[in-house]
Image (cartoon, grey):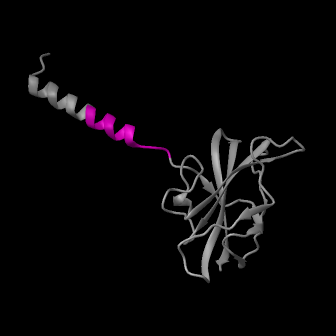
Amino acid sequence: MRFSTSTFLSALALSAASFTQAASLVKRQIVIPTHGTTVAPADGSTITPGTTFPFNYEHANVCESGYSPISVYLSTSPPTSADVTNAGELADGSFVFHFGDYLIPNFGLPPMETPPPATLPAPTLDVADGTTLYFSVVELYRDCPGNIHLEFGLETTTVVYA
C-alpha cells in the first residue's frame, strides 16, 4: 500500500491537532460542598484597616489527614468554586487580599510550618467604608478515599469594611 505525500501530511496534521487539543485539557479541581466553618470573624463583623480582628476556623478535615492546609482571602464579590484553582488557591482577580496559607494540625500532632494565627491584620484597601466584603477560606483535602488526590472546600462569610 502506498501513501501519497498529501495523505501523509494530512494524517500528520490531524495527529498534531489531536495531540494539541489533548495536551491543553487540564483536569479541573473538585470543590465539594462539605467545608469547615469560620467562627471568627462572625458573619457581618466589622473590620477596620490597620487593626487586627479575631480569626478562628473550624476545619472539616474531610479525608482525616494529619494536617489540613487552608488559604485565607478577602474579596469584593463572593468567590465560587470556579474561582478555586487546581493548586487550591483563589484565582488572581477573584480576591483583593490574601492573608496567607496556614497548616492546621490534627489528632494532637505538633504544629508545622505556619499554623493559623488567632488574629489577622485588617488590610488597607481601595474600597469605600461600609462596603461588604467576603472573607473566604479554601481548605485542601488530600488523598481522599476513591483515589481522589485533591479536593477542596470553600467557605465564605461576610465582613463590613469600615
Location of the N terminus (image quadrant) = top left
- Picture coordinates of residue 27, whole percent (x, y): 49, 44
* Left or right: where 73 falls relative to 115: left
Q: Residue at position x 48%, y 61% from top?
A: 93
- Picture coordinates of residue 110, whole percent (x, y): 86, 41
Q: Which residues are magenta?
A: 16-27
Magenta run includes residue 31: no
81 vs 29: above or below: below
Magenta run includes residue 17: yes
Q: Residue furthest right?
A: 108
Q: Residue furthest bottom?
A: 130
Q: Residue furthest front?
A: 50
Which image quarter: residue 36?
A: bottom right
10 vs 26: above or below: above
Q: Residue at position x 69%, y 52% from top?
A: 70
- Picture coordinates of residue 55, whole percent (x, y): 77, 64
89 vs 75: above or below: above
Secondary structure, magenta segment, majority class: helix
- Picture coordinates of residue 34, whole percent (x, y): 70, 59
Q: Residue at position x 79%, y 41% from top?
A: 112
Which image quarter: residue 77?
A: bottom right
* Nearer to the camera, 12 or 38: 38
* Left or right: where 40 falls relative to 78: right
Location of the C terminus (image quadrant) = bottom right
Q: Residue at position x 66%, y 74% from top?
A: 158
Which image quarter: residue 147?
A: top right
